Amino acid sequence: MSATEETSDTEAVETAKTADLEVEASRLVRIIAALVLVVLSGTFLVGVFDIRSPDGLDPAGPRFFPLLVTAAWLLLSLAYLVESLRSPRTAGAPDHSWFEPVALSALLILYAFLVVPLGYMIATALLFYAAARVLGSRQLVRDIIVAVVLAVVVYIAFTQFLDISLPEGVLGL
């Protein structure tokens, strides 16, 4: 065996070890993130029961929708935790990009700052459109239409059917 072949083999072994460490670190980060999501959703779920409502869990009452959302959040967080625990520990595991979750988190923070001055419909439509782009969609017209339709439908559902006021912003709705 020549020195070049030994160097090549050594580099391959080091590369494999590095890849395995990166996958294990990524797996650990996903498990920790899942645990944080479970704790947060469980905390919010307990907080939902502090909402005073003479109607109890009546779908027309103020407690129903937050209960529905936080219960779904808890179930999805638990599913994510199970998936993270079951994920492979080797470099053959799928590559997970950090861009999407970081970009979506940044969009949600930006949304929190823009929803009041711009109003619910504009800020939400921009959020939906930007989220679709971050997640890989390249259908410009479809993304805009879906974002606007979703924002309007959710706005109408909240304001007309649930009697919840949302920020009016520049549109004054």
Image (tube, rainbow, N blue to C red):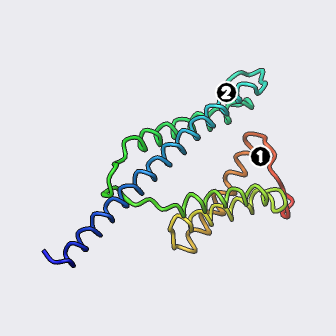
Up the image or down, 140 lies above or below 122; here it is below
Which residue type does callout 2 highlight? Val
**Of callouts 2 and 1, the N-terminal one:** 2
Figure label count: 2
Task: State which quadrant residue 8 falls in.
Answer: bottom left
Q: Residue at x 27, y 63 (%)?
A: 13
Q: Residue at x 41, y 40 (%)?
A: 85
Question: Going by the image, does 94 lie left or right of 131?
Answer: left
Up the image or down, 147 lies above or below 29; here it is below
Up the image or down, 112 lies above or below 54; here it is below
Q: Residue at x 49, y 36 (%)?
A: 78
The residue identified by callout 2 is 46
Q: Which label sits on residue 21?
A: none
Question: Going by the image, does 116 lie left or right of 158?
Answer: right
Residue furthest front as drawn? 3
Up the image or down, 96 lies above or below 85; here it is below
Tell me whether the residue at label 2 lies in contact with that at label 1, contact meaning CB atoms closer than 8 angstroms: no
Q: Nearer the viewer, residue 100 or 23?
A: 23
Across and down, in percent, residue 168 comes to: 84, 56
Q: Nearer the viewer, residue 92 or 17?
A: 17
As measured in the structure, the alpha-carbon distance from the residue carrying label 2 to the one carrying label 1 is 26 Å
Which residue type does callout 1 highlight? Thr
Q: Which label sits on residue 159?
A: 1
